[in-house]
Amino acid sequence: MKKAIKILLIIIGVVLIALVGIVGYFYVSYNNYSFNDGFQVNEKNLSYYNESYEEARSDFLLKSNEIALKYPDSRTFKIPVSSNVDTNLSIDFCYIRASQKTDKIFILSSGVHGVEGHVGSAVQLYFMDNYINDSLLNKTNVLLIHAVNPYGFKFTRRVTENNVDLNRNSDIDKDLFSKTNEGYPKVYDLINPEGKANAGSLANRFFFIKSIVAIAKESMPVLRQAVLQGQYEHPTGLYFGGKDFEPQIKDMVISIDTICDAYQTIFAIDLHTGYGERAKLHLFPNPVDEPVKKRMEDVFEGFHIDWGDSDKFYTYSGDFVTYIQKINSDKIFIPMLFEYGTMDSQTTIGSIKSLHTMILENQAEQYAYKSEEDREKIKFDFMEMYNPSSEAWRSHIIDETKIIFDKSLKRFTELEF
């Protein structure tokens, strides 16, 4: 009997040591999560990045004016976005008409998720420098939409001043706001904590344990869909899609419809950052019907498209590129979302870290920061998630974009749909 008890105690001891080791490993890995990007840096690529909304907007307008001098049949205009804290926010447009008659138009939009506008604007500036030329404009018209969410861009938020996620708010049908996310109540307490944000609290240092318990209970795909799908019931919660359309979503309909009215074939790319494998450009559309899917596969032949049917991705409603499609429901449409990965969120730790970063930022916005140190830590992590400071990452993203732009734009302009 004593021998049996001794063996049992040894087993319990071994198990406890193993558990402590596992928890310790995850604690260190989670709280020291970082990357060492080894890509070659091209200084020219870095020149397209700006550290503020004002600088990015200034560069966009400067390049728009340069284009107008070279191609007089182009124009720049803006849609002001009202705000209680800033009177100089706007969505800026650069519309360049083709030099020859064509029924095609290419649309490139950025900053739907405000803080993601840093990278989105850089990609647009790169496009303006390297693709607005006689070769492209002989075959297609171009519309650039800069900083769809200028408030979020300027004030380092993903959402609007009303805490609305524009990529869950973009539609022309108010039925969007009656949609129900049945999984959201299961994760509400996990992702919407109350009280001042304290990044160094025990609960936050061991957040990965709570998340792993939730994953074990529901599975990662179920949790990912519940969190990222969007919701229309909790105005202070993560991924809130609103109770009504945000002002700029209402205001842009006429402009987009008027410009696209003359064209029959539309290729639209919306630029995002944050989700997916680090430094990889993911092609990440919402599900589409077969004819649209076939056109997308033709344009992006040779590139992997994540159709949202893998357990590493998710589906949602109210996205901006589908909104453009609905405005042009009678046209041949080719939609795509470019997602530049930053956090390796296809991994368990990366996914939990990404979610935790968003939770802390939203908690701080709703309930304030515990201290100035918390403010600096939370803001820094949030910016790094959507606009990495790594020069190697930034340069590589432009290189990745060039590869896809070179081939997809050529196919779009040459194929008959």
Image (cartoon, grey):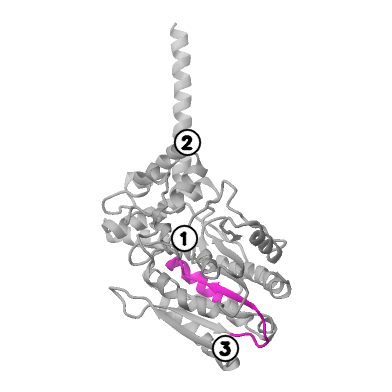
Q: Is residue 123 visible?
A: no
The mark tally for this picture is 3
Pick whichever of labels 3 and 2 is earlier in the sequence.
3
Q: Amino acid at mark 1?
A: Gly
Which image quadrant is residue 278 in? bottom right
> Is 105 part of what is drawn in magenta?
yes
Instruction: Compute the Cα span from label 2 to label 1.
Output: 30 Å
Q: Given this view, does label 2 or label 1 mark the residue nearer the observer?
A: 1
Q: Which residue is mark 2?
A: 216
Q: Amino acid at mark 3?
A: Ile
x%, y% of residue 317? 48, 57
Q: Amino acid at mark 2?
A: Ala
As drawn, the residue found furthest toward the top would be 1
Q: Which residue is mark 3?
A: 67
Q: Which residue is mark 1?
A: 318
**Element marked by disc 2:** helix
Q: Is residue 337 visible?
A: yes
**Element marked by disc 1:** loop
Does residue 261 appear to the left or right of 12 in the view shown? right
The N terminus lies in quadrant: top left
Tag 2: Cα neighbours inside 10 Å, few (<14), some, or many (≥20)?
A: few
Does residue 286 appear to the left or right of 57 in the view shown? right
x%, y% of residue 65? 52, 89
Q: Which residues are magenta?
A: 97-125
Instruction: Compute the Cα span from label 3 to label 2.
Output: 54 Å
Pick whichever of labels 2 and 1 is earlier in the sequence.
2
Q: Nearer the viewer, residue 279 or 255?
A: 255
> Is 142 part of what is drawn in magenta?
no
Q: Nearer the viewer, residue 396 or 21?
A: 396
- In the image, residue 345 sits, relative to residue 258, either above or below, namely above
**Element marked by disc 3:** helix
- In the image, residue 197 sits, relative to residue 115, either above or below, namely above
